[in-house]
Image: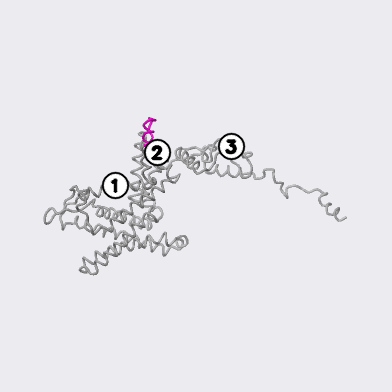
Amino acid sequence: MNNLERTYSTNNPNESNDTTHRIKYLERSFYSKTSMYAFFVVAFLFITMWIGTAQFKKIDLMLAGYMVASFIFFIGITVRMASWLMRPATNEMVKRSIKNLFTKKRTKRNIAAILKTFVDNIILQKFIFKRGLYRGIQHWLIAWGCIGSFAITFGLTFGWMHFRLIDATTYQMMVFNLPTIKMQANGIFAELVYNGLNITALMVLVGIIMALVRRINNHDLKVTERAEFDLLPLYILLAVTVSGLLLTVSYKFLGGFIHPQLALIHQVTVVLFLIYFPFGKLFHLPIRPLATAVPMNYQEEPMVDTRSCKKCSTKYSSDDQIADVKTILHEQQFDLKLDDGTYLADYCPSCRRRIRVMSQLNLGSVKGNPYGPVQTNNGIHIPGFGRRRSEEFYNQSDKGDK
């Protein structure tokens, strides 16, 4: 039974064993767990597509290229997420999150943590604005432009959303083949819906221009940036947004001038972007919501430490976080257990550094005041200028000459 399976185990041993056997039996049907997860993701997409398109009767074949790329996108995201969750630190964090999420006494705290993370990290993205207003606006425009574009693209590509003509002047939005909002064909709301991708493309375009200007003018970034990792995603996004906006300019203002060629170019850029997304820098977007694990698991009180150091009693962390650190280090074969049965993680950073220094100096404990200056003379090395030499030392050379 692996870590995630232990999380779901119940108090009933028989029921737990039955669940484990079912999972193991299911896993044997696939080459690996990752392939099993990818299968279920693709099956889910096909089922929702079957529902949204009325049993595949309303598939837009003009979006076939986007649809294939979208399937590759979700398979790639599944593979990357599975490999990321296999890491000891991530696995322990997810295991702790699942356990705490289903703990009744933590319900209020969990809801507060989820809402706070959603508002602060997803909607407002305060973690970026702390690094500067310019950088915050740039990142917010790119992030929400991409999120909006994904929502519209996947909704149309998989048939989750389409429009039905009610009468000559009225459309109705169909979501998973269920009627929802009605709107006037020439109304303001309809115009916003029609131009949803144009609006998100403009957001991304402004954000990309701001990012490129920042990277051109900031000489510190040039030292650490890598073209294939930091600049390539910006260029791909720029190609997608510019080609998409040129399509709108072509059919609205130029009477469809070179529209088929522009449509093909735009499709190629979008397909390239969707295939690249799971395997490049932009992968941080879908895993950002997992930041909720910090306030949900490792803060008994927001921004307040509750774990006391074994030596100086200073508050430096939380019990859950230290327990997870010990587990992660153990799984990675790091033995940081001390002679007295404690671990380095049981001490605050200051005491931890002190313990390392004493260990390197072959001192099991600090002499004298434990909080005073570190005494580096451990009696092993005799100081060269700390003792007066006898007269016999100076006479040795004379005896040798004789």
Q: Secondary structure at mark 3?
A: loop
Tell me where residue 268 appears, x and y as whole percent: 31, 62
The mark nearer the N terminus, 2 or 3, is 2
Residue 5 image label: 2
Q: Position of residue 72 (x, y in %)?
A: 33, 54
Q: Amino acid at mark 2?
A: Glu
Is 194 placed above or below 46 here? Answer: below
Q: Residues within 10 Å of mark 1 (few under 14, many from 20)?
A: few
Seen from the viewer's position, the closer of residues 235 and 144 is 235
Q: Residues within 10 Å of mark 3 (few under 14, many from 20)?
A: few
Which of the two discs, 2 and 3, sits closer to the camera? 2
Query: Which amino acid, by three-letter code, is at mark 1?
Result: Phe
Marks 3 and 1: CB-CB under 8 Å? no
Residue linked to disc 3: 339
The front one of 206 and 245 is 245
Disc 2 element: helix
Query: Along the polypeptide, which appears first: circle 3 or circle 1?
Result: 1
Q: Residue at position x 22%, y 56% from top?
A: 60
Label of residue 44 in the image: 1
Q: Nearer the viewer, residue 390 or 187?
A: 187
